[in-house]
Image (cartoon, grey):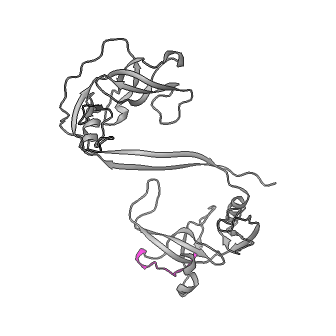
Amino acid sequence: MPAVLKAPLVVEFPFTRSLGPVQSAFLTGLRDRVVLGVKTGDGRTLVPPVEYDPVTAEEIRDLVEVAPTGTVTTWAWNHEPRRGQPLSSPFAWVMVRLDGADTALLHALDAPGPDAVHTGLRVRVRWAEDRVGAITDIVCFEPYDGDPAEPAGHSGTFEDPVTGIVAAARLDYTYSPGRAQSAYINALSERRNVGERCPSCRKVYVPPRGACPTCGVATSEQVEVGPGGTVTTFCIVNIKAKNLDIEVPYVYAHIALDGAGLALHGRIGGIPYDQVRMGLRVEPVWTEGGRFPDHYRPTGEPDADYEMYKELL
């Protein structure tokens, strides 16, 4: 039996967003150790603030300072903190209603154990030493047995306000391909493309999936396809990706390998980006030791007729 393949994979991208006046004031306030909420038309104070009343959908802009002390309304103990969470040692996730607020804020509570946490526990903000205008300016909450803090009545107007944030979205997981994709990956190491044919519709899937998604039947008949193929559709990439050593602009295309029943994607090289076109005939280019084609380049053959690949768009 062949060895089971597995590999650690990370999907990560930075999400950049601009801030409206309410969120800008809230995050700028955290930078300056001020917690702001927003007051609704019926007098409720929402923390964290939102731009529209969740009950009436009215736009709300009336900012009001609340205290950095509050009360735990509900909680859950986190035995094993994960990468990127507020604290590296076990802690409690808590909903805290800050003094002066009518809603609760989710954050971490630094406590010695679950026995030290309960609904109604009084807490206060622990501020980060270096603050940049982000929710992480609050390191966590900590138990507090003093008097409620008194807000200074900040107006919500700041010099040099925070106008945008970058949030890193990331997913770490271990991928283990099944029988069909393991055969496909092993064939790639021999510079071959192997798919599987559906016994019902006869479509050849590359990469194979172990079953036909159209007919719902298992596939097992292996079919070698390519190595050449046809560009069916493509896009021109003008934004350089992090950790990708490819100069922009470049072309990413769907390529229908000869004999395949659907197109796979790959980068097109060896031709100016503005000369790539639908129907272009291409072949794979392998690098020394590479387990998959680095890119595809033109073969010099005449372009494929549209009727030959229109069903693969």
* Quarter of the view holding residue 201: bottom right
- On screen, residue 174 versus residue 65, left or right, reads right
Closer to us: 198 or 281? 198
* Quarter of the view holding residue 165: top left
Q: Residue at x 49, y 74 (%)?
A: 233
Residue 304 visible at all: no
Does the magenta portion include 281? Answer: yes
User: Eyeballing the image, is 161 above or below 97?
Assistant: below
User: Eyeballing the image, is 306 above or below 199?
Assistant: below
Closer to us: 126 or 122? 122
Residue 274 picture location, percent across and down? 40, 77
User: Eyeballing the image, is 254 above or below 157?
Assistant: below
Q: Residue furthest right?
A: 1
* Quarter of the view holding residue 210: bottom right
Q: Residue at x 28, y 24 (%)?
A: 100
| Quarter of the image where the N terminus is located | bottom right
Closer to us: 130 or 66? 66
Closer to us: 68 or 237? 68
Residue 248 visible at all: yes
Q: Residue at x 19, y 28 (%)?
A: 154
Residue 77 picture location, percent across and down? 53, 25
- On screen, residue 261 versus residue 156, left or right, reads right
Does the magenta portion include 266? Answer: no
- On screen, residue 66 versus residue 281, left or right, reads left
User: Eyeballing the image, is 265 above or below 136?
Assistant: below
Residue 125 picture location, percent across and down? 35, 23
- On screen, residue 276 versus residue 214, left or right, reads left
- Magenta range is 273-283
Q: How many marks?
A: 0
Residue 43 picture location, percent across and down? 24, 31
